[in-house]
Image (cartoon, helix red, strand yellow):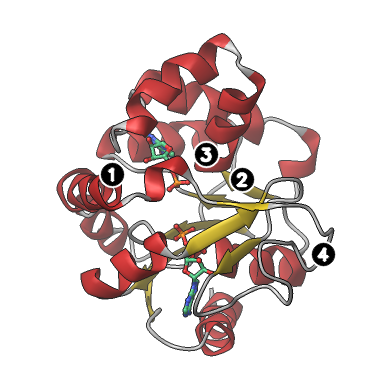
Amino acid sequence: MNIVIMGPPGAGKGTQAEFIKNKYQIPHISTGDMFREAVKKGTPMGKEAQKYMNEGKLVPDQVTIGIVEDRLAEADCQAGFLLDGFPRTIVQAQALDGVMEKLGRKIDAVINITVPDNILIQRMSGRVSCKECGKVYHLVFSPPAVEGKCDECSAELIQRSDDNAETAAKRLQVYNEQTSPLLDYYQDKGLLRNVDGDRDPKLVGSDIAASLDKA
Ligand code: ADP
Ligand code: AMP
């Protein structure tokens, strides 16, 4: 299965990606995670990306398309993949179509998780993740067993620097302006599956599984 998961920042894409990648045994490719890794390592691309991420803006298309194209050519993507956070612009979506055509493949489904804006802000402001394994928690909705420590590996939990109120609001604005037009793009192709994300994560997950099983 070649799947794209969409939705505004904080909708629960990463949370649901964990379920999907285990069920379908496909790699989870998050461009946000790839950029955060590059920032952590201090690579030239990471330094470039960080300027945009800190302001809640999109990293330029040429940079983003290049890293996704390289990643999709890797061996573990040959039996399918789950793209999270990409595409985010029409230019990126058209580039993805071009890459798929070159590889002789197609996107099977685009899952769109919908959540009201006021809930998204609560989700981003309470999100913390493990410094080592990346597992995502929420201070109120899904707290760790021991405060500040990962349930899986006991490492420290940290907050993303772009989850502060000002940058989170900017990211929502950027989503509405630049990314939401993609919903029509995929609707027109008959690929879009809308899922109500304002419910228990397990219920959201079973709706996603049901719509993917039909894809
Ligand atoms: P995204 O990848 O779309 O930005 P995440 O999966 O990181 O979103 O989720 C954002 C925050 O909301 C996290 O703290 C996560 O634990 C929490 N969260 C995710 N899904 C739900 C849900 N269905 N109900 C309540 N909280 C959720
Ligand atoms: P995310 O983890 O998906 O919330 O992404 C965090 C940040 O990384 C975004 O606010 C952007 O600055 C950058 N980013 C991630 N994916 C993309 C993309 N497809 N295009 C441009 N910028 C991206």
Task: Tell me the CA gap for discs 4 and 1.
Answer: 29 Å
Q: Which residue is mark 1?
A: 167
Q: Are marks 3 and 2 in contact (CB under 8 Å)?
A: yes
Answer with mark 4 or mark 2, whichever residue precedes in sequence. Answer: 2
Q: Who is closer to the viewer here, 35 or 131?
A: 131
| Type of amino acid under label 1 | Thr
Q: Which residue is mark 2?
A: 29
Q: Are marks 4 and 3 in contact (CB under 8 Å)?
A: no
Q: Which residue is mark 4?
A: 152
Residue 42, picture quadrant = top right
Q: Secondary structure at mark 1?
A: helix
Q: Secondary structure at mark 2?
A: strand
Task: Tell me the CA gap for discs 1 and 2.
Answer: 23 Å
Q: For this view, does 128 lie left or right of residue 179?
A: right
Answer with mark 1 or mark 2, whichever residue precedes in sequence. Answer: 2
Q: Who's the residue at 15% across and 47% down the image?
A: 177
Answer with mark 4 or mark 1, whichever residue precedes in sequence. Answer: 4
Task: Tell me the CA gap for discs 4 and 2.
Answer: 21 Å
Q: For this view, does 48 lie left or right of residue 135?
A: left
**Which percent across, then down, holds residue 201?**
54, 82
Q: Are marks 4 and 2 in contact (CB under 8 Å)?
A: no
